[in-house]
Image (tube, rainbow, N blue to C red):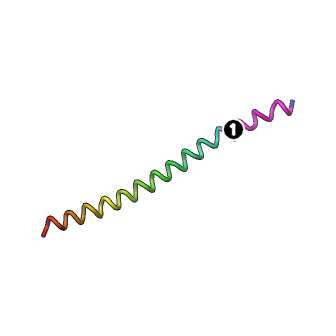
Amino acid sequence: MSMLRTPNSHLPLWSGVPMFRIIVLLILVCINSMLIGLIWDEIMMRIFWQFQY
């Protein structure tokens, strides 16, 4: 019985790996969007100051 139950006990681990990857991908996307937002703000400010002169 224990040999038959071991695959079932491994299933939660396998289902947990994709969730961990999705969480890591979401964190990376959030960091990238923050960096893009900061760079975009800097570019827009430079264009804004150029138009003022």
**Residue at the disc numbered 1:** 12
Q: Which residue is rendered at x = 51% and y = 48% of the image?
A: 25
User: Residue type at mark 1?
Assistant: Pro
Question: Is 20 on the left-hand or right-hand side of 34?
Answer: right
Q: Position of residue 16 (x, y in %)?
A: 64, 42
- Residue 12 magenta-highlighted: yes
Compared with residue 34, is residue 4 higher up or lower down, i.e. above or below?
above
Instruction: Give residue 18's position: percent from left, percent from top.
Output: 60, 41
Q: How many marks?
A: 1
Question: Which stretch appears magenta?
Answer: 2-14
Q: Secondary structure at mark 1?
A: helix
Q: In the picture provided, is 13 more to the left or to the right than 48?
A: right
In the picture, measured across the screen, residue 23 lies left or right of residue 45, that is right
Q: Residue 32 location, x and y as percent? A: 43, 55
> Does 30 sit above or below residue 46?
above
Horizontal side, residue 40 vs residue 32: left or right: left
Predominant SS of the magenta segment: helix
Residue extending farthest to the left is 53
Residue visible at 45% across and 53% down? 30
Q: Residues within 10 Å of mark 1 (few under 14, many from 20)?
A: few
Q: Is residue 19 above or below residue 47?
A: above
On the rendered image, what quadrant is the C terminus found in?
Answer: bottom left
Q: Position of residue 37 (x, y in %)?
A: 35, 57
Tell me what residue is drawn at x 54 percent, y 47 percent.
23
